[in-house]
Image (cartoon, rainbow, N blue to C red):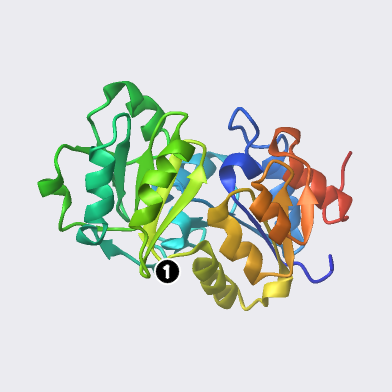
Amino acid sequence: MNAEIRLIVTDMDGTLLDGERRLPERFSETVRALAARGIRWAIASGRQLANLQARFKPLNVDVDIIAENGALAWAAGEARPFFEDLTPTDFFEPVLREALATPGASAVLCGAEQAFVHDRYPEDLAEITQYFAVHAPWHDLSEALGLRVCKVAIYHPHAAEALYPRLAPLATAERRVILSGPEWVDVQHVRIDKANALAALLRRQGLRPDQAIVFGDYLNDAGMLALVPHSVAMANALPELRERAAAIAPPNTQNGVLAHLRTIGLIEGD
């Protein structure tokens, strides 16, 4: 397998980042060493593209990015995404109304260039906006409708898993409602999936699915893992994802991605 791998794809939170949301030690050196052998690294996250670009730019490494659960894909060094899929916010109106009727919930409208963060809970803004490097406030539904966005992300501190059952019935044949983290429920058009953006990235690089290894921990990673034979769920992943993966890596709190890559001989080190 190792001789064929040309792309490593990792989710961020709960996968590549540790429990303190830190990148693994020697991450930059590892990416550079792999690049010298013709192996690229890609990040596939529910986070904002601008947020991810800002996170990796100081590291001076070439990392391709799949952002907003696959609504955007960007190649390192380019001015604009090479893959983009946006949806009018009117499509999300029932979900937004339910979120606004739920105490403690905040809705983020995730545009291609900036996010619009509902400001009704100022005490949550610091936590929410750490995921959105470029953002502006929004106040009521009338100003939200008419925008074109990648997705709507509903935040609830420590209670997204309780909020999810309220939002899940609003799913339709075209609208996906997915639990994407302990505090987040993401709502997107069903055509949006990290797998679609990954497929576009593979085509762009002239690679086959079996030339990629993909790591994830939550259900928004399931499509990607299904796309490639070399799929890896973290030990801390949801049970449903672990059941679908070809292999299990140590937990993110133990730098599981790099540990697994060492185990299979793709990188060296202790």
Q: Quadrant of the N terminus?
A: bottom right
Q: Position of residue 31 (x, y in %)?
A: 69, 50
Residue at point 87%, 42% (across, down) = 269
Question: Would residue 228 be seen by someone viewing this image from the given angle?
Answer: yes
Q: Position of residue 70 (x, y in %)?
A: 47, 61
Q: Position of residue 74 (x, y in %)?
A: 47, 61
At label 1, which amino acid type do we have?
A: Phe
Q: Quadrant of the C terminus?
A: top right
| Quarter occupied by residue 215 | bottom right
Q: Nearer the viewer, residue 43 or 93?
A: 93
Q: Nearer the viewer, residue 213 or 102?
A: 102
- Is 255 rendered above or below residue 223? above
- Is 93 rendered above or below residue 132? below
SS at badge 1: strand
**How many C-alpha atoms fall within 10 Å of the one at disc 1: few (<14), some, or many (≥20)?**
some
Q: Position of residue 160 (x, y in %)?
A: 45, 37
52 relative to 116 in the view: left or right: right
Question: Would residue 63 be seen by someone viewing this image from the given angle?
Answer: no
- Is 177 rendered above or below residue 164? below
- Is 244 rendered above or below residue 228? above
| Quarter occupied by residue 106 | top left
Residue at point 67%, 77% (across, down) = 208
List the single residue furthest toward the top: 123
Residue at point 28%, 42% (across, down) = 99
Q: How many marks?
A: 1
The residue tagged 1 is: 83
